[in-house]
Amino acid sequence: MGAGYTCMKYIFIFLNIIFLLLSVAGIGLSIWMFVDPTIPLHFTQESRDYLITTIIILLASIILLIVSLLGIYSVGQEIRKALIVSFCLLLIIVVAEIAAGVWGYINRDNLEQHIRASVKNSVRDDYDKDENVKKLFDTIQAKLHCCGAEHATDWTRGKGYNMGVSGNPNQYNIPESCCREGISSEDCRSATHDVKVGSEPNRRFIYDNGCYTMIYEKLKESCCIILIAGGVILGIQLLGLILGLILACSMNRSHRYKA
């Protein structure tokens, strides 16, 4: 029991150090999601659901932080009750992660439709009303080299932003974030201001790819990375559960022999 038990203790402590690092990363991610309005993940959910998701990530990270500290403390000090509490909290996290994964798999077909509707709604309605959406969409258009939801002509939506300068119902404006890199500010303004409705924007100066496709492709790439990372993390957590259970039983026997 001595050598094997000691080896499991060190492995368990190492796993909890990994949990500690993951929890700090999760807390950092949730704070970033709170304060940065330019994250494309905003398009995957409604604003209220996005806020709830962020809070859940923060709470799960805090619980994982407690799990890691309790795990290291319980094994280092041979305190079985603390180890059991750590085991139970980790089990809750694992069950929640599996449930979230199953829910995501079931609803995967709705993601594309929701992103398309969300991007279109941002162009049509929210861009003028919400400064965070405006900042988010300008950032996306500049970084992903795209314009509008599906095309630059999506900005003919007839809202205040388009009509604010010219006041002409036959003309519209395109955000200057649609301008290609390297062009002069004069060329950018001439290509984005007072564009005739029904005419094609100047593709020499304006990006011709729609942002919906670019956002969806980026999120698909991110989802693959998240799935791989999530699978690895879940495997480590399951190993932690198994080792925690074995150590808790071994501690009980060890204490009984000492008595």
Image (spheres, rainbow, N blue to C red):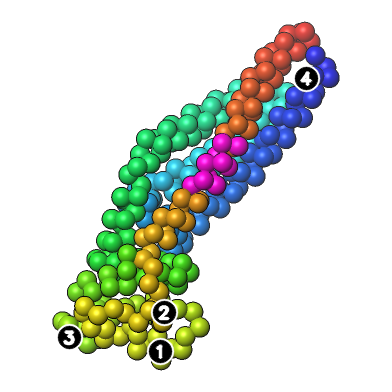
Q: CA distance from mark 4 to mark 1?
A: 72 Å
Lower position in the chain sequence, tag 3 or tag 2 = 3
Tell me the kind of residue under disc 2: Cys
Could you say where residue 132 lies in the image, as x and y percent from the top left?
A: 37, 66
Q: Tags 2 and 4 in contact by the CB under 8 Å rule? A: no
Find disc 2 in the rendering and name its residue.
Answer: 179
The residue that appears at 72% across and 32% down in the rendered structure is 13
| Number of numbered discs visible in the structure rendering | 4
Figure quadrant of the N terminus: top right
Q: CA distance from mark 3 to mark 4?
A: 80 Å
Q: CA distance from mark 3 to mark 2?
A: 22 Å
Q: Is residue 31 magenta?
A: no
Find disc 3 in the rendering and name its residue.
Answer: 168
Name above or below for residue 4 compared with residue 63: above
Tell me the kind of residue under disc 1: Asp
Could you say where residue 125 lies in the image, as x and y percent from the top left?
A: 24, 66
Q: Is disc 1 placed on a helix, strand or loop?
A: helix
Other residues around mark 3 within 10 Å, as few (<14) / some (14–19) / many (≥20)? few
Tell me the kind of residue under disc 4: Tyr
Q: Tags 2 and 1 in contact by the CB under 8 Å rule? A: yes
Lower position in the chain sequence, tag 2 or tag 4 = 4
Q: Which residues are magenta?
A: 223-232
- In this view, the mark in front (4 or 1): 1
Name above or below for residue 156 compared with residue 10: below
Find disc 4 in the rendering and name its residue.
Answer: 5
